[in-house]
């Protein structure tokens, strides 16, 4: 149930008068639907919520699940309504800007300040890249002063919103310590400490020598959440591409029989993989899952911006494990190098 926010409609985080309308739409970084994302670019003004609501209900193409934000802020009332709308649709949030809306392109680092930060908090999964800017500061009103009782009521609503979105409410104290004109830019450490980024966020790919080639691997930026993989590795083995899941201390969870014969499977957002391609083994207390993929699938990985990889168990076993990974252009080059002997 949405909390009432109409009473704070006069409050903003940056003056929004005479500002341009925000851009709302869908953009792609590649030729397939899996590379597409939603963007909200520009000031948060009166009517932005309705614009986004109309886009999600009438114009969104497919099941695009992530939203890139690039905004200096604006109307707080609009931002909170937008945030609850994104959470209702179970969307993920990131910060980034589209360099050219007329061409297929990757997002570049962006800025999400003031009221925009509250929209960012609404993502089911939230992640920040190096260079992305997330800024918070004290709310204010345009045209009139904020009385003590009103300010207290508004503060309570903002704290409740943070709790609703799973963000540490101590962040409100940090924001309130700023002046109206000032801005506190959230550091990577603070983003983790205040739960602004979720445990699902994985770091950039790393390369390591492997036989006559290399492997590319990534780990969560923080402790892996339940069901998340502690390390994802991409490699080319005997001329065939593979993905390897490593789970620390989870050997007891392994179902050693074929996932296909036991009703389990493997899901991915960029293409199908046969359940029989998944195998598992234990090494001491740790678990390893090997996923054999096709060369076509490996090629797709070298160009997609995000991939969701999930192994799910049959009803008798229950549960799932997986990782949601974001790839930069540099990551793509590393994957191309890793799969060089598999896809050429």
Image: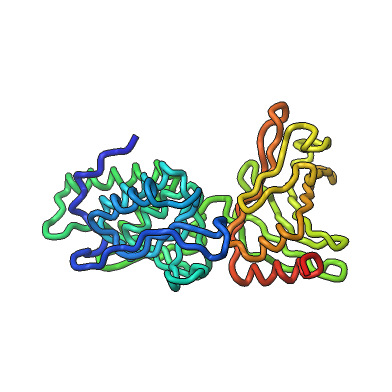
| Above or below, comparing residue 97 to residue 251 in the picture | below
Question: Which of 84 and 341 lies nearest the eye of the viewer?
Answer: 341
Residue 156 x %, y %: 28, 43
Residue depicted at x 26% and y 39% = 4
Give the colour scheme shown. rainbow
Residue 114 x %, y %: 32, 60
Question: Which of 253 and 90 lies nearest the eye of the viewer?
Answer: 90
Residue 194 x %, y %: 46, 52
Q: Is residue 223 visible?
A: no
Residue depicted at x 22% and y 64% = 16
Side (left or right) of 244 relative to 305: right
Question: Which of 111 and 105 lies nearest the eye of the viewer?
Answer: 105
Side (left or right) of 88 relative to 180: right
**Residue lying farthest to the left in this orientation:** 144
Residue depicted at x 20% and y 50% = 9
Q: Is residue 330 visible?
A: yes
Residue depicted at x 72% and y 30% = 317
Quarter of the figure with the C terminus: bottom right
């Amino acid at each position: 149930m949405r909390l009432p926010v109409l009473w704070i409609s006069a409050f903003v985080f940056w003056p929004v008068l005479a500002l341009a309308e925000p851009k709302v739409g869908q953009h792609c970084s590649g030729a397939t639907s899996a590379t597409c994302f939603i963007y909200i670019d520009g000031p948060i003004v009166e009517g932005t919520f309705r614009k986004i609501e109309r886009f999600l209900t009438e114009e969104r193409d497919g099941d695009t699940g992530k939203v890139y934000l690039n905004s200096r802020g604006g109307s707080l009332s609009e931002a909170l309504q937008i945030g609850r709308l994104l959470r209702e649709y179970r969307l993920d949030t990131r910060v980034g800007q589209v360099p050219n809306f007329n061409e297929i392109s990757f997002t570049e680092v962006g800025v999400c300040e003031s009221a925009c930060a509250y929209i960012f908090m609404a993502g089911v999964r939230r992640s920040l890249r190096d260079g992305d800017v997330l800024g918070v500061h004290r709310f204010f009103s345009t045209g009139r002063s904020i009385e003590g009782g009103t300010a207290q009521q508004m503060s309570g609503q903002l704290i409740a919103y943070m709790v609703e979105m799973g963000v540490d409410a101590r962040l409100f104290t940090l924001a309130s310590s700023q002046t109206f004109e000032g801005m506190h830019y959230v550091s990577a450490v603070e983003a983790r400490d205040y739960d602004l980024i979720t445990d699902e966020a994985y770091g950039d790919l790393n390369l390591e020598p492997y036989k006559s080639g290399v492997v590319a691997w990534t780990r969560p930026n923080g402790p892996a959440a339940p069901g998340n993989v502690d390390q994802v590795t991409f490699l080319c083995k005997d001329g065939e591409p593979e993905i390897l899941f490593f789970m620390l201390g989870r050997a007891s969870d392994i179902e050693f029989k074929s996932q296909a014969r036991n009703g389990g499977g493997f899901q991915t957002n960029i293409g199908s993989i046969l359940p029989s391609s998944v195998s598992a083994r234990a090494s001491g207390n740790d678990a390893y899952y090997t996923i054999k993929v096709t060369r076509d699938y490996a090629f797709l990985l070298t160009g997609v911006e995000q991939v969701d990889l999930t192994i799910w168990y049959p009803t008798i076993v229950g549960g799932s494990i997986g990782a949601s990974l974001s790839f930069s252009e540099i990551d793509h080059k590393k994957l191309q190098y890793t799969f060089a002997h598999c896809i050429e």
